[in-house]
Image (cartoon, rainbow, N blue to C red):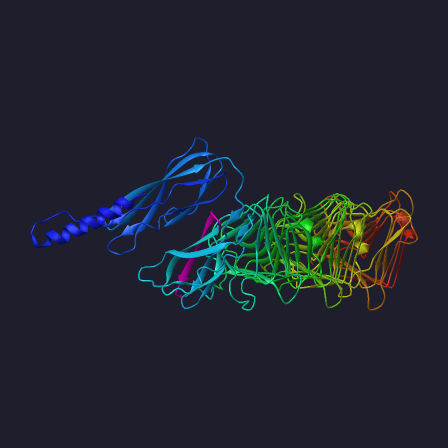
Amino acid sequence: MKNFKILGLILLVFAGLVSSCEEIDEEPTNPLIAEAGEEQQLVPNAVAILDGSESVNSVGAPINYQWELIEKPEGATIKTSTLNKVAVQFSTNKPGEYVFKLTVTYQSWFDTDTVRVIVVEGPVSKLEAKAGENREIVIGNSIQLDGSKSVNELGGAMEFIWEIIQKPEGSLAEIRFPDDAVANFQPDKPGNYLVKLTVKVQSNFSVDLVEILVKEDNGGADGSILITGDILQDRVLENVFVDQDMLFDYIITKDIKVGARLTVKPGVRIGFEQDVRLTISPNGTLIADAPLDNLGIVFQGKENTLGFWEGILMESGSPGNILRGVEIKNAGQGPLGTALMVEEGGLVRLIKTNIHSNRGVGLEFVYGGNFSEFISCKIENNTTAHLRIPAYLVRDVSILNQIGPGKIQVIEARLNDGTEHIWPTFEADYDILEDLVIYGGSNWVISDGAHINMAENTGIRVIQQSKILLLGEMGKPVVIEGITKTKGYWKGIHIENSGSQQSKILWAEIRHAGSNPVVSGNESATLTFGRQTWASVEHTILDKGKASGLVTKGEASFFDFNMNSVNNHDSYPIVVSTNHVEKLGYNNRFESNGKAEVLVDSQQPIDFGVKEVTWKGFLQRVPYLVKGQSTNNLIIKSGLRLEAGVTLKMMPGAGISVLPGNLGESYLKLDGIAGGTVRIQGLEETPGSWLGILISTTSQENEFNYAEILHAGKTSPDRFSAAIHVDDVPEGALVIKNSTIAKSGQHGISVKNSLQDRLKTFNMNFEDIPGSNIHIW
């Protein structure tokens, strides 16, 4: 279009030479001539190449190029490659006339030219040049330029022409075999090279571009194919370096969205530039499937450092998404903060995939994200957690995966689907980051060797006919403790309304609880049994709690607590209602608690009809402490038997009353033996610190043998007091033998004169009784 410009330039140069002998100052001549190429014609959605390589700089220095679209049909949508290159790819969806302006610059000079592209309706071209993917190599290496995938549906021989149309200043590089489908090229200087491929069949031709970035050192990515734009059409990433599997086959240079089917073939290694993310959009699919163990697929940073790139975001719910035989590493940079995140609505199959050496989280499932298969994977060496997952998905993670050592973070901690959730045991601990609530008939099952860490001030609540099963083994307990290993870091476990679902805690260790009640209005404790609980606890350690160990409420229905240890709690090892003292096994052990006694809450009477209740005490002779007062005594309305060795401490002002029951006999039987007395004493070891024992039934089972009654008989200004009072209305009866009554506030035993025959004493010992040993009134 502008040959006249070249002729003019020659004439100007010649004129300058002729007149050089004359000393006349003239304006410098512009050395630039812009050449935008010949007018082109194409059909919609076909690709044209705007080629400015014929532009001239007469001084021989490199030119800067800038293309600009200055005219187009209204409503047209266009696509172009980078507009500051010597050649630009262009396509559009609408017929009409398009005008591009090319501006070339050098120092302060510039020149412009325009070119028209006419788009007309017509069939898609049956001839298409394909120069291959953009590449990146290290200086000193050669590269193959492969046009063999160009399309020829016209028939006949296809000619190939390779040309370097842009290269770094001073480069003398040339293409070997430029007329072959596959040519060789060895760059001689670092920088950008732009190569044009023209294919011809008779009078038809097609053009394509390939860019080659040559670096001094790029981490070994010799000949890597650059991925620089979103993938919006189906694409296959082939294994480029079949015999050099440590080289990057592809380098992703910027955030990429996949809106089509992306297939990554076995053996492919993909490197990511710093802070880059790969997003599989809702309408995209990622197929990275390497079923053979010796030919995997790698997604990694260009530099082998933690958090070098962001990671993969899976927004797609396509059932075709698969990662098999894949390795993901060096990811986890913010804001994604995870190597692979499955977003709400996302779905993926994970088989034999290795996610390791990432900053932040290795694999994360956001609430609503899911997997169709998750098996035989290895997830390790991630800095924050290996896996972050909603509680309801944990059971579906195959035990055949290797996760850890390290952490699995559990979020969205609600199990309410009415089914069983068996959490597999891995080397990694589970960190539960919020209150875990099991309800709606659901079951939570943890097996031997599992380790669970609770976040600060969180708790575990089991309600609405649900249950937990903590099923450890000797030497392989289930451990539940705080993420931070300090007393009172988390709340504890609360079970209530079990219905027909029995919770079982077997060979477990539960620590660092008691920060606050799991359910407001209750006491803080490591383990709480609320209303209508059905549970059993055996061979379990409750340790390092800020409050009490076990707390049971009066309406708890059924539980067993045996062969356990409650240690290092700031308050009582156990707080238990009178109805459930007998459920505490003799072989429970208690060490180093702030309050040494087992606290008995006497708000509920002992009233089991014809059934006798036995308080067995404990192997270590740990006392019971009755929490009562003058208006809230330990009330016995059925049979209560205290076995040999039991010690019962009474809080100040508390008392024991044996009253007639509604069904069977009511009685108190202290069944001591020589060397193993039953002792009832005051918490405050001072005379008359508690009320004493009132016997108001005539049962023959009211019998004290080898008993010690100490510190009873709290005095009153308007009546006498005694450690034991045999009542007259209703009438009482008592047999007491081989026993000691000491340090009473006033009398030892009191009985009405007319009812002396109701009191039978044998081999008695009275000590420090300020009044009468036996007071007859």
> Residue 694: image x %, image y %?
82, 49
Say whether residue 686 is left or right of residue 335: right
Q: Image quarter for residue 355?
A: bottom right
> Residue 615: image x %, image y %?
82, 57
Q: Is residue 530 above or below residue 597?
A: above
Q: Which of 693 and 492 lies nearest the eye of the viewer?
A: 492
Task: Please report the residue visible at 51 percent of the width from the left and 54 percent of the height from the top.
Answer: 158
Q: Which of 598 and 726 lies nearest the eye of the viewer?
A: 598
> Residue 312: image x %, image y %?
55, 53
> Residue 48: image x %, image y %?
44, 44
Toward the left, the furthest residue is 23
Q: Which residues are magenta?
A: 201-216
Q: Image quarter for residue 102?
A: top left
Q: Quadrant of the N terminus?
A: top left
By secondary structure, the bulk of the magenta-drawn segment is best described as strand
Q: Which of 391 and 448 lies nearest the eye of the viewer?
A: 391
Q: Is residue 521 above or below residue 289?
A: above
The question of residue 207 being in magenta is answered with yes
Q: Can residue 582 be seen?
A: yes
Report how many numbered discs are placed on residues in the image. 0
Q: Can residue 709 be seen?
A: no
The question of residue 715 being in magenta is answered with no
Say whether residue 96 is left or right of residue 427: left
